[in-house]
Image (cartoon, helix red, strand yellow):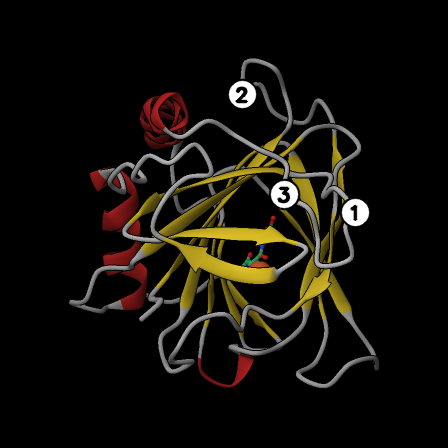
Amino acid sequence: MKPTLTIRGFDVFRGYLDAAKQREIVGNLRSVIRTAPLFSPETRWGKKMSVQMTSAGKYGWFSDRRGYRYEEHHPNGGAWPPIPEAILRVWHEVSGLERAPDCCLLNLYRASAKMGMHQDRDEADFSWPVVSISLGDDGLFRIANEERGGKTESIWLQSGDVVVMGGKARLHHHGIDRIRSGTSTLLQNGGRINLTMRVVD
Ligand code: MD6
Ligand code: FE
């Protein structure tokens, strides 16, 4: 399968999920959130992140003043729920990999939430890609370089879009500058969900 476009090595599959698939996945996510409620992690610098998060899979991503890491348990002490089949299918289809991801991180952006420029580098082996699914309102995704600073390029990610960050792009900085409220009716309370699947070990 060919991506719709590639920017800075990020493969973008526009409208990969149709409306019915998106609704199915949102339904699955409701059960994930019931088992593993959303929380707002603190950054390393003690500032509350504007996104709410939770995870599914063997590991969940977590952050507090002790730093960024993967944990085998939700902050409430329970195991993370399994990654729903419909989400795993997207990973296998777009990555072509047999191996399943260890973590599906769910980020929820309400109207004014954003995500600062970062690298995804808490995983053991960067030869595995990260696959992302966008659901709900449009989000302005900014892509930079592996080094800090320099020129950036931005793209509006829409509900149903899938992005693969692998190969030379695996350590590029990226972030979400803002979301465009009210551009989708998929989520009952509005906002945007981004799912990222990773191999952790
Ligand atoms: C977001 N995405 O779209 C944030 N990371 O809300 C990410 O941080 C991301 O889209 C790794 C690979 C793809 C991504
Ligand atoms: Fe990321």
Drawn side of residue 2 relative to residue 37, left or right: left
Callout 2: 10 Å neighbours few (<14), some, many (20+)?
Answer: some
Residue picked out by circle 2: 187
Residue toward you, 162 or 88:
88
Q: Quadrant of residue 137?
A: top right
| Mark 1 sits near ligand 1, with its Cβ under 8 Å away | no
Query: Looking at the picture, which amino acid does disc 3 mark?
Result: Pro
Q: Quadrant of residue 144?
A: bottom right
| CA–CA distance in space, label 3 to label 1 | 9 Å
Q: Residue placed at 54% from the left, 66% from the top?
A: 5
In x, y percent, where is residue 162? 45, 52
| CA–CA distance in space, label 3 to label 2 | 22 Å
Q: Earlier in the sequence, mark 3 or mark 1?
A: 3
Q: Quadrant of ligand 2?
A: bottom right
Residue picked out by circle 3: 41
Compared to residue 176, the image places residue 27 above or below, namely: above
Callout 3: 10 Å neighbours few (<14), some, many (20+)?
Answer: many
The answer to the question of whether label 3 and label 1 lie on touching residues, with beta carbons closer than 8 A, is no
Query: Looking at the picture, which amino acid does disc 1 mark?
Result: Lys
In x, y percent, where is residue 38? 52, 30
